Amino acid sequence: MTKTMIRSVIRGTGSCLPARVVGNDELAGRVETSDEWIAQRTGIRRRHIAAEGETTSTLAIAAARAALADAGLEASDIDLIIVATATPDYTFPSVATQVQAGLEITHGVAFDVAAVCSGFVFALATADKFLTSGSHRRALVIGSETFSRILDWNDRTTCVLFGDGAGAVVVEAQEAGGTVSDRGVLTSHLRSDGRHRSKLYVDGGPSTTGKAGHLRMEGREVFRHAVGMITDVVEDAFAATGLTAEDVKWFVPHQANKRIIDASAEKLGIAAHKVVITVQDHGNTSAASIPLALDEARRDGRIRQGDLVLIEAMGGGFTWGSALIRW
Ligand code: UT7
């Protein structure tokens, strides 16, 4: 006998990328690097960079509008907005309240979560807990970033890696049968370990320098931990549901580096044709990378209703997490 329960079902997706595209060759004109080095080490060929006046909140609002249209819902149907970002327009108010105002929503609750590159997984897991508790009905979960604003454009070890953009999903509480055949978020797993906080950080902030600061990273150290942490937390998702790599239709990882994605998929036994990769066109857009990839794979017809989708991410903190979603 199965029991009825509430699941958080993804009802629509949307995204927004700045119009300006910067190729590797353009960066090679600024710092000592080459298209060949960047492409070979990371898989990145180009990234979108926000124009003046384009901010994390303007990108987030555009992605949210696209997701609402895709879901066939009005802004007034939303009672929960969670934005994952490490690059807010202001120290406060949150980007989420800016999105709420931009969409002219005056009810419900809106807040940001800070988990850097893992932010979208953290935000979706948080929304899932609100929706399945019965306290809220429809959520906008958004990952939005303008990392171009916190890069040191003279540091070749970081400035070639990141890009700007936003992705959004509309998540709705729906009655379900309580099995892994249900549509919706089937399980989510979040982890963090602050001992690693100085391996990937920003060297400023309101309470220290009073300035936004610049991203600093020990790339090799992050890389060294990434695959193990990612595969561990995905194995947790499989163990919690009894599902396996075989059951996964689409693997939509955080897009930091194609070598990390390939090594994780291989270690998990997920075939290459099931992996959604956008890093070549977007670079690492931190919390935006997964919802951007979800939106792309759904709009081009890859992700369809009923498909089992695996998402995972790892980033600054360190933070890491995974979720299995039946579309
Ligand atoms: O999303 C959040 C999580 N972040 C990540 O997942 C990033 C994880 N790390 C990485 O993706 C990789 O470590 C990088 C792409 C950052 C670097 O790749 P790597 O294969 O680990 O290279 P490396 O740091 O070991 O550097 C190799 C060489 C160094 O020169 P030496 O010391 O061997 O002479 C670097 O100075 O490459 C040099 N280098 C560059 N050369 C040309 C570093 N950056 C560049 C560059 N162009 N842009």
Image (tube, rainbow, N blue to C red):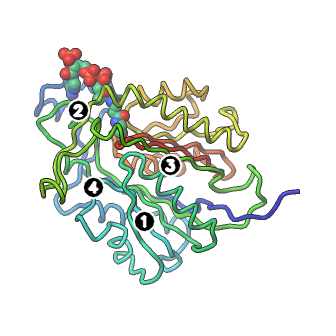
Inspect the image, locate mark 3, and give the three-letter code of the amino acid beneath it.
Leu
Local SS, label 1: helix
Relative to 315, is 235 on the left or the right?
A: right
Residue at x 29% of width, y 49% of height: 164
Q: Which residue is mark 1?
A: 64
Circle 4 SS class: loop
The first of marks 1 and 4 along the sequence is 1
Taking the image as shown, residue 154 lies to the left or right of residue 41, namely left
**Residue position for label 2:** 24
Whole-percent x, y for residue 305 in the image: 66, 53
Q: In x, y percent, where is residue 142?
A: 43, 60
Amino acid identity at mark 2:
Asn
Q: Secondary structure at mark 3?
A: helix
Q: Quadrant of residue 63?
A: bottom left
Q: Secondary structure at mark 2?
A: helix
Q: Amino acid at mark 1?
A: Ala
For label 4, count other residues whose C-alpha is less than 10 Å away and answer few (under 14), some (14-19) or many (20+): many
Q: How far apart are the two marked residues, 1 and 2, measured between alpha carbons?
A: 29 Å
- Decide which of tag 3 and tag 4 comes sooner along the chain: 4
Verify CB contact (< 8 Å) between mark 3 and mark 4.
Answer: no
Q: Which mark is residue 19?
A: none
Q: Is residue 186 visible?
A: yes
The image quadrant where one finds the N terminus is: bottom right
In this picture, is 233 found above or below 303? above
Q: From the image, state whether disc 2 or disc 4 is nearer to you.
A: 4
Q: How far apart are the alpha carbons under marks 1 and 4?
A: 17 Å
Q: Which residue is mark 3?
A: 294
Is 103 placed above or below 184 here? below
Q: Which residue is mark 4?
A: 87
